[in-house]
Amino acid sequence: MTAVTRFWPLLCGTQRYEKTLSTRGTGAGVIIEAPILAYLVETANGRILYDVGCDYRKLSEPALRAQWYGNPAFPFGPPEVTAADRLPARLARLGLDVRDIDCVVCGHLHFDHGGGLHEFAHAEVHVHRAELQAMREQADEAYFRDDFAHGAHWCEHAGEATLAAGVQLIETPGHTAGHMSLLIELPEGKPVLLCGDAADLQENLDAEIAPGLCWRERTDLALASIRKLKRIGAESGAELWPNHDMAFFRARDTFPVARR
């Protein structure tokens, strides 16, 4: 029996970039608009947030925007986060405050997934041990060390884990060293398997294409994780949710109406 009562995808901004950043070796010259997402999972025992979006302060304050995004790592520009897209505003429209979140899961710690952690200093932050190490080593330019300067309450995992009945962390390394996806058993209908950046687009899943950025160029790990997600989906009947696919998200965006 699942403990999950409700589930919402939350749009926390958008970013335009060349498709090659999502599909390794294909999509040159094609600019896509990708959603930046967080996901709220309400259970009988508390509320879980999977990912927390960007640190919007680094976008709204000109000096910080120039410091963090005014460099060659962002040739297509920084993300766009409106006031309504800020995670506290999204939660407020659901009648919630950031302190109503009991724990956070960071599928990985790139700036667009872990940047909002400053809002959740009160909560445990679940992350894979290898991911935390990669962040501390600044394994690539998408880790912003400043995003973690506030001192999060880390809850490290060395492998897969169950957070609550019906909520399971799934190891899916490749895009990053310790990437984790999340399998959610809903009270009705198919389970949802949040792929995170193991699969940005539906195309990553359908054609088994690795993400553009792979930890230490380990495309083999990335492809193995895509196949693992597809296998779990087939075995569990779960719908796989790619993380940066705007068309996929728009077809399932029920905010602020809850999926029940």
Image (spheres, rainbow, N blue to C red):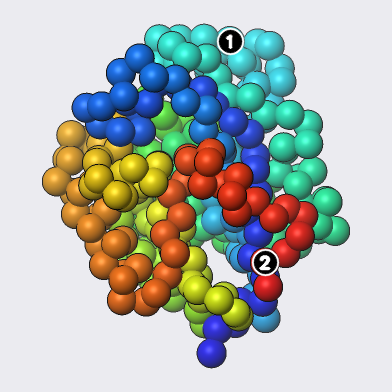
Instruction: Report the residue at 69% width, 61% height from top.
Output: 101
Q: Where is residue 172 in the image (x, y as percent from the top left)?
A: 30, 56
The image quadrant that residue 12 belongs to is: top right
Instruction: Report the residue at 51% width, 47% height from top.
Output: 248
Residue placed most toward the observer, 92 or 147: 92
Judged from the image, the secondary structure of the residue bearing numbered disc 1 is: helix
Residue placed most toward the observer, 163 or 2: 2
Q: Where is residue 32 in the image (x, y as percent from the top left)?
A: 47, 26
Residue 53 versus residue 72 in the image, above or below: below
Q: Where is residue 41 in the image (x, y as percent from the top left)?
A: 62, 65
In the image, is 228 to the left or to the right of 104? left
The image quadrant that residue 7 belongs to is: bottom right
Instruction: Report the residue at 14% width, 46% height from top.
Output: 220
Mark 1 or mark 2, which has the lower sequence index?
Answer: 1
Residue 125 versus residue 199 in the image, above or below: below
The three-letter code of the residue at mark 1 reads Ala
Q: State the residue position of label 1.
A: 66
Q: Alpha carbon of mark 1 to alpha carbon of mark 2: how far?
A: 39 Å
Q: Nearer the viewer, mark 1 or mark 2?
A: 2
How many numbered tags mark residues here?
2
Q: Where is residue 254 in the image (x, y as percent from the top left)?
A: 69, 55
- Label 1 crowd (10 A; few <14 / some 14-19 / many >=20): few
Residue 175 in view of the camera: no
Residue 17 in view of the camera: yes
Image quadrant in which the C terminus is located: bottom right
Judged from the image, the secondary structure of the residue bearing numbered disc 2 is: loop
Q: State the residue position of label 2.
A: 259
